[in-house]
Image (spheres, rainbow, N blue to C red):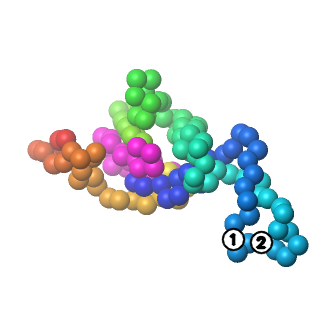
Amino acid sequence: MDVKTAFLNGSLDESIYMVQPEGFIEKGQVDKVCKLQKSIYGLKQASRSWNIRFDQAVKGFGFIQNPNEPCVYKRIKGDKLVFLILYVDDILLIGNDVGVLTSVKDWLAKQFDMKDLGEASFILGIQVIRGRKNRTIA
């Protein structure tokens, strides 16, 4: 899955001002600046604020972050297991129950503007092939 305009989801902890964008300056308001309410692309802290926002959201949904690999989260409920791997603004979901994966995808789509890219065929340049009994082998 891909998070559309991911960096625009981040919140800012500090006051940041910017020059008014061209085409949005009203007459008599030329000397004014814009105070940002949310993160935007181009800010040095944009990727960090997005990551904090994402981390808080998935932990609130019951995922636990892997302490050794912070981009990997897991959620276990009974015998249902889901791994969520975040790579900047791309998400890979792996699990042992299609229904649970679907519910996680639905929840993510309610939190962020998402694009479902379908089943993974390559992950970081590694081809994913289906093994016996539909088990994925990477």
Is 66 part of what is drawn in magenta?
no
Q: Is residue 50 left or right of residue 69?
A: right
* Location of residue 72 by image quarter: top left
Estimate the x, y position of residue 4 in percent, counting from the top left: 49, 59
Q: Callout 1: few (<14), some (14-19), or many (20+) C-alpha neighbours within 10 Å?
A: few
Q: Is residue 73 left or right of residue 23?
A: left
**Residue 64 drawn at (x, y percent):** 48, 30
Asked whether residue 35 is in view, the answer is yes
Q: Is residue 110 above or below residue 29?
A: above
Task: Assign the C terminus to one quadrant of the image.
Answer: top left
Q: Quadrant of the N terminus?
A: bottom left
Is residue 103 visible in this depiction of the protein? no
Q: Quadrant of residue 119?
A: bottom left
Q: Nearer the viewer, residue 114 or 97?
A: 114
Q: Which residue is mark 2?
A: 25
Magenta-colored span = 87-107
Give the image location of residue 53, x and y in percent. 59, 42
Q: Please determine whether, in this image, residue 83 is positioned above or below residue 43.
A: above
- SS category of the residue bearing label 2: loop
Name the amino acid type tagged 2. Ile
Inspect the magenta stretch and tell me whether residue 93 lies in it: yes
Mark number, residue 81: none
Q: Residues within 10 Å of mark 2 (few under 14, many from 20)?
A: some
* Residues marked 1 and 2 touching at CB (< 8 Å): yes
Which residue does the image show at 40% across and 47% down from the upper left?
Answer: 91
Instruction: Give the residue at x 69% y 71%.
Output: 22
| Kind of residue at disc 1 | Glu
Which element carries disc 1, helix, strand or loop? loop
Q: Residue furthest right?
A: 28
Instruction: Tell me, for residue 22, which label it has, or none.
Output: 1
Q: CA distance from mark 1 to mark 2?
A: 7 Å
Residue at the spot x=17%, y=41% of the render? 137
